[in-house]
Image: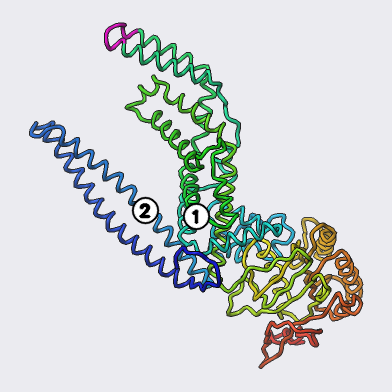
Amino acid sequence: MTDSGTKGLQVWQPVAEYERRLNARRERIADFDRTHFRISNLRLLVAASVALLLWLAFGRAMVSPWWPLAGAIVFGALVVVHARLLERAERARRAARLYERGIDRLAGHWAGVGRDGAVFAEGHPYARDLDLFGRASLFELLNTAVTEAGESTLADWLKRGAALGEVRARQAAVDELRARLDLREEVAVIAAEGEISRTGSLARWAASPPEAFPPSVRSLFIACVIVTIALTLLGYFDVLPWTALIAWLFVEGIVVWNWRHALHGIIERIGKPADDLKILAALADRIEREPFTAPRLTALRGGLKSPQGGAESASRAIARLEQLVSLLEGSMHNLFFMPITRALLVPEQLAIAIDRWHALNGAAVADWLRIVGEIEALSALATYAYEHPADPFPALSADGPVFDAEGLGHPLLGDNVSVRNDVRLGGTHGAAPRVVIVSGSNMSGKSTWLRSVGVNVVLALAGAPIRAASLTVSPLVLGATLRIDDSLEAGQSRFYSEILRIRAIVESARGPTPLLFLLDEILHGTNSYDRRIGAEAIVRALVEAGAVGLVTTHDLALTELPARLGSAAVNMHFEDRLEDGRMVFDYRMRPGVVEHSNALALMRAIGLDV
């Protein structure tokens, strides 16, 4: 599989392609290791030769001093070549790990291995209900992002659905990126070299105000340098005594002293962000060179420009800053050249140049980091699309609420265990019900079914493929009660926590975007009479507010709701059977109401005498 186009019904073979690429990277690593061994031995040989030549040249005067100098140059060249080789070898190892993780994902061995994004779940209304974050979550399955910017962008997309235009733009971008394995590999390998963050040191430095030296200060420093050079030449030709230069250097120091705090602040603040500059420049350069066709990708690539206009790209602008920082560090830490650079005010002038870059380009750094994050998030969705070639993109409908799926499954379950079902909710012509009451016995699959619906809505409105034969979906907000806990700290029972959640869901149903509610074992913490009356009132209020959804229950009294709500509601159920004292579930959803319960059978099956 090459980085060719993705149009049409292309058949993907992700396992075979990953294995091919993994073997190629391992062969490359083996080649690098052999070359590393040879260069290491050659460096030792050259170093020994230089030592011998130094002794022959200065100890015995048998050879010219140029010979050890030539040997030192050869040794220095070997050091540079060796460093580049080690960098390429490390990138090959990162690429190998990338495909190893991909093969593990395809084999179903991904849960608990990657970064799970648990921090993103805090305060979210339904993230825990749908396993969006945490161990064995949707985020962990999707997340191939390496940078903090990429991870937070992906998490944002999962936490809130996008408008239809945005979803379509992401779909086109994901469809194009899914075949760009080389690009996705290179971006991941480069990003893994450090920590690119939308909230990290580089972003904070860029967002901070620059010192904004007036042009007169730079002109004054240049004038000081000119005087220093002139006095040096005059002293060299014995026109003036050297004491004049020494006296001038004291005057120059007093001039610089007036701006010492501002200059020191610039030098100190750029220290940590400098670590990220090389990586950001490399990422920007790789993205800038890719010939995209999808509108979202071309827009992102086009955003990697200097805000000063012209043709300067972000990678070149960042490379200029990186060069300034490198020169600054060299001018301050090279003991041999430090007296010269200090006399010529090199650190001070470089600090002013860095501050000027900060003033001109600092505001654009946040956009560049955002673009890198979006490319990584789109690449994560594209990786998922590549690894699941049978999963289509959903059809998007502006007329809602609608959720119409055929062969819907749960993306966190493997194909060998996932059982798919159809579900139709809403629609513009009233052909489908607005509420499905799902009855069934314990462990029959009701809660998993609710999660299947909710997670596929999340995928659909994030711009990703969905786990279904087909799905038509409109913009929806989600409300779920699949995981409700009591709280000793807050003094709340489970029932009280549930009705507080339901109140928030009813309030959400009154918003501008239609609601899809997923109510699991509704009001099961109270008696049957109150449950029936309360559930009917809640569901009726949701329907009247324009919402659609599913309600699961063990209480067969709640299956009378469709009779009261009319055509807006239907009954569906999951069932089971007892075979040789063992409960057997087929996880197929059927019309109507479940006809029996398995609670007593389950208790007896585990040895309880009931």
Residue 146 position (above or below residue 349)? below
Instruction: Provide the residue designation for mark 2.
Output: 88
Helix, strand or loop status at disc 2: helix
Q: Could you tell me residue 364's position as x and y percent?
A: 58, 40
Find out whether residue 462 is within the magenta segment: no
| Magenta-colored span | 234-243
Closer-to-camera residue (414/153):
153
Is residue 52 in view from this perspective? yes
Label 2 Cα crowd, 10 Å radius (few <14 / some 14-19 / many 20+): some
Q: Residue furthest top?
A: 240
Q: Which amino acid is tagged 1?
A: Pro
Q: Residue furthest bottom?
A: 580
Label 1 Cα crowd, 10 Å radius (few <14 / some 14-19 / many 20+): few
Q: Give the residue drawn at x 82%, y 57%.
A: 511
Coloration of the structure image: rainbow
Is residue 485 in view from this perspective? no
Q: Give the residue drawn at x 10%, y 34%.
A: 63
Residue 229 position (above or below residue 167)? above
Horizontal side of residue 254 vs 471, given as left or right: left
- Distance, label 1 to label 2, CA atoms, is 24 Å
- Which dot marks residue 358? none
Helix, strand or loop status at disc 1: loop
Q: Which amino acid is tagged 2?
A: Arg
Instruction: Find residue 556 and report its image quarter.
Output: bottom right
- Which dot marks residue 291? 1
Q: Could you tell me residue 460's position as x and y percent?
A: 67, 65
Residue 288 position (above or below residue 510)? above
Q: Could you tell me residue 453's position as x and y percent?
A: 71, 71
The quadrant the N terminus occupies is: bottom left
